[in-house]
Structures are given as C-alpha cells and as structure tokens.
C-alpha cells in the first residue's frame, strides 16, 4: 500500500492537438494551441511546460528557503526555456531554468536551487528523461 495522498488533479480536455484548444474542467484554463514557430494565435505545449515547471520550481525554492530560515528576494525570477528537438530517435525535449535571486548570497542560492531541483515534482518527473539544467544567473 502506498502512503501517497493526491493533493490535486488537473483535468484538461484537448481537441485538435497542436492546432487545437485546451480547456480545464473548471474553466480557468481555456486557450488556443498552435505549433511552435507557427503564426497561429495560441500557445504551445512547450510554453505551457516552461510556465508550469518554473512556477512549481519557485514554489519548491520557497519551501527549501523556509526550511533554512531564509527569505527569498521579492524580485526572484525564473527564465525557462524548453526546446522541442528532433533526432534519430524521433522527437525529444530539453529544458533549462535560469534562476535570478538578486541580493541572495550565491552559495546559499545554489543550495536552495539544488534542494528545489530534488524536490520539485516537475524536476522529479523529468529526471533522466530529458536534458534538463538549472542555473543561477
């Protein structure tokens, strides 16, 4: 038996794939999708992943900082990049987070980033499956 407790389940209905639409069951997400680099009016899955991972990562950093008795700077920011790649084995992703923590000692910031990378659910989900890098600006 697992001691895992589900805290939240996202329910999203997608039609039309990369040229379609996505809508959450609660209506809070309702957007058009488009292929990366196209002139389509919507966002794409890579942008959604970049937003989700960086938002989750910042939350993991806050938890790690709190455990050390440290307050993160209010202007903390994360720039995320997600690459859609194609190679001999088909399509794949690569992703990078670049964390900016002005005023925070770089050694402390790196410790918090390392802890967050071990605990963030997105980081854990992609571990070993895609090329992922997290750096301090």
Image (tube, rainbow, N blue to C red):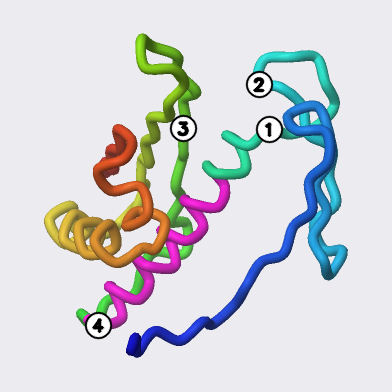
Which is closer to the viewer, label 4 or label 3?
3
Tell me which numbered mark, 4 or 2, is placed earlier along the sequence. 2
Which is closer to the viewer, label 3 or label 2?
2
Task: List x then y, in percent, for residue 9.
Answer: 62, 72
Task: List x then y, in percent, for residue 86.
Answer: 45, 14
Instruction: Name the image quarter holding residue 49.
Output: top right
Contact between marks 3 and 1 (CB within 8 A): the answer is no
Q: Is residue 73 left or right of residue 35?
A: left
Residue 44 image label: 1
Q: How many marks?
A: 4
Tell me if residue 50 comes above or below residue 85 in the rendering.
below
Q: Is residue 7 left or right of residue 95?
A: right
Tell me which numbered mark, 4 or 3, is placed earlier along the sequence. 4
User: To which residue does mark 2 refer?
Assistant: 36
Q: Residue at x 47, y 64 (%)?
A: 74
Outermost residue toward the front in this view: 1
Majority secondary structure of magenta residues: helix
Q: Residues within 10 Å of mark 2 (few under 14, many from 20)?
A: some
Q: Residues within 10 Å of mark 4 (few under 14, many from 20)?
A: few
Q: Residue at x 18, y 54 (%)?
A: 110
In magenta, the rendered stretch is: 51-67
User: To which residue does mark 4 refer?
Assistant: 67
User: To which residue does mark 3 refer?
Assistant: 81
- Disc 4 versus disc 2: distance between alpha carbons? 39 Å
Tell me which numbered mark, 3 or 1, is placed earlier along the sequence. 1
- Disc 3 versus disc 1: distance between alpha carbons? 13 Å
Contact between marks 2 and 1 (CB within 8 A): the answer is yes
């Amino acid at each position: 038996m697992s001691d895992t407790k589900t805290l939240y389940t996202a329910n999203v209905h997608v039609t039309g794939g990369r040229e379609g639409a996505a809508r959450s069951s609660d209506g809070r997400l309702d957007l058009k999708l488009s292929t990366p680099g196209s002139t389509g009016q919507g966002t794409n899955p890579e942008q959604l992943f970049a937003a989700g991972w960086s938002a989750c990562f910042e939350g993991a950093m806050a938890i790690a900082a709190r455990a050390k008795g440290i307050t993160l700077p209010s202007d903390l920011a994360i720039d995320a990049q997600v690459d859609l790649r194609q190679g001999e084995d088909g399509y794949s992703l690569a992703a990078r987070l670049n964390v900016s923590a002005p005023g925070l000692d770089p050694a402390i910031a790196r410790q918090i980033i390392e802890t967050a990378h071990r605990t963030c659910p997105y980081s854990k989900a992609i571990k070993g499956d895609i090329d992922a890098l997290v750096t301090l600006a």
